[in-house]
Image: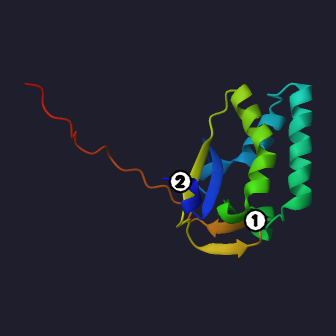
Amino acid sequence: MKHLQYKYVRIQGKELTRNTMYAKGVFSMFMKMLQENVMDEEDAGLYREIDSWFAENLPWPPQCRNQESVVCWFKTENSEEMMKMIRPALWLLERYHQPYFLVYTNSPGEIVYEDQYQIVTKTDGYLMIDDPQPSWSPEES
């Protein structure tokens, strides 16, 4: 399927954030990398430039500022400029072996904030973990 069929995209890692029980978003991933001095000085500078561009061009939702149990999604309909600006950051994640995922959806949850480029959705802070399902592979003869 083409990603343009989806309304929203989120860039996230593998680590969960305690207050949301949801995978950390790309900006949180980089904050941790900066705090832990994972990147060399030049690469950290590149990320700071990227972050500054986003700070100037992407509104900071009050729910995120208040560290509420929410997650942010880019709107695919007009996120082309945002995705173009985030590509160097994705390159940095790859360079420092930080796994990330592009998650596309049409049903992100209850929207509590929206602007031209993004939405913010509520999470319940609950992580459901199921037991593995029985194997579906055919038995060996």
Numbered tag placed on residue 85 in the rendering: none
Which one is nearer the viewer's eye here, 78 or 73? 78
Which one is nearer the viewer's eye here, 2 or 26? 2
Q: Is residue 125 visible?
A: no
Q: CA distance from mark 1 to mark 2?
A: 20 Å
Where is residue 137? Give x, y as percent.
Answer: 20, 36
* Color scheme of the displayed model: rainbow
The mark that comes first in sequence, 1 or 2, is 2
Report the residue marked by disc 2.
Answer: 2
Residue 6, by quadrant, is bottom right
Which element type, helix, strand or loop, lies under badge 2? loop
Which element type, helix, strand or loop, lies under badge 1? loop
Vertical position of residue 8 compared to residue 110: above or below: above
Q: Looking at the picture, which amino acid does disc 1 mark?
A: Tyr
Report the residue marked by disc 1.
Answer: 117
Q: Circle 2: is it few (<14), some (14-19), or many (20+) Cα within 10 Å? A: few
Residue at the image point whose x is 72% and y is 73% from the top: 114
Count of picture labels? 2
Q: Is residue 100 visible?
A: yes
Where is residue 31? Give x, y as percent.
Answer: 80, 43
104 left or right of 35 in image = left
